[in-house]
Amino acid sequence: MRKKFVAGNWKMYCGDPAKAVELAKGVVASVGSQAAVEAAVCPPATALAAVVTACAGSQVGVGGQNLYPKDEGAFTGELSAPFLKALGCRYVILGHSERRTYFKEDDAFINLKVKAALTADLVPIFCCGETEQEREQGITEKVVEAQVRGGLAGLDVEQLGKVVVAYEPVWAIGTGKNATPEDAQAVHAFIRGLLGSLASASVAESIRIQYGGSVKPDNAATLLSQKDIDGALVGGASLKADSFAAIIQAAGG
Ligand code: 13P
């Protein structure tokens, strides 16, 4: 039985540590003691340390939004997986479509990041998803398959078992448009089948696959009731403690 996992991707919002702590404390107050649903917040790097402190002793974990796949070195402006780990992070979001689009991250680079995260004992939240044009062309599965095969290449079965996958159709991110629960479920089932061929059927059964893209308190329950939807990666609605808590409650928390 997979435990549902809801994570908030704060993106480039709430980077002021004081504001971030206020939001994190609101999340902790609402859901920080429940253990039925795994919950995490992923603030900007500037607020990570303060948010780790605010969430300490609660059930709310903290994640980074990116990393650079070297432990240290002359890479001005970058953060490594060991740095995130030392700060107290448990997770890191990798391969988000915003990074693929705006920062031209390709599958091979994302693959290095996934491996760096696993080496540092961070849980990668590995994102994949098609654009609207790709969906209209009927190539959603082909695109998602290439992203999953490329991004998770070279991982052994044990490492694959530690990954969380987030299916985020690009056209549903920040747009208020949702995939229908049935359409989302179909892609999730496809991804699970693919993970089965990369790892094993039993490992694939244990991997959480989150849905992301305009998840709100009013649509979360239907999406999360689908067989292969194991949680949510939430953008906008994670920036208010009450709406994020409502999504966690919809997931069973
Ligand atoms: P929204 O929930 O704002 O659509 O963002 C989804 C997302 O990109 C999470 O990573």
Image: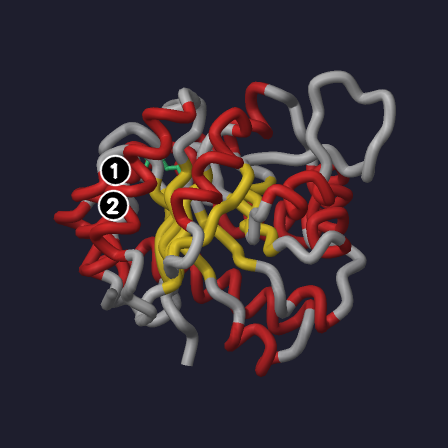
Up-down: is 123 above or below 189? above
Could you classify mark 1 by the number of other residues whose Cα lies within 10 Å: few (under 14), some (14-19), or many (20 or more)?
A: many
**Pointer 1 residue Cβ closer than 8 Å to ligand 1:** yes
At 40% from the left edge and 71% from the top edge, which residue is drawn? 3
Residue 55 position within the rendered picture, expressed as x and y whole percent measured from the top left: 40, 48
Residue 132 position within the rendered picture, expressed as x and y whole percent measured from the top left: 40, 32
Nearest the camera: 131 or 1? Answer: 1
Residue annotated with mark 2 = 244
- 165 sits to left or right of 66: left
Circles 2 and 1 in contact, beta carbons < 8 Å: yes
Q: Quadrant of residue 186?
A: bottom left
At 52% from the left edge and 33% from the top edge, which residue is drawn? 97
Residue annotated with mark 1 = 237
Spatial separation of the CA atoms under disc 2 and disc 1: 6 Å
At 48% from the left edge and 39% from the top edge, which residue is drawn? 130
Residue 251 position within the rendered picture, expressed as x and y whole percent measured from the top left: 26, 62
Which numbered circle lies on residue 180? none
Nearest the camera: 147 or 68? Answer: 68
Q: Secondary structure at mark 2?
A: helix
| Residue 231 in view (yes/no) | yes
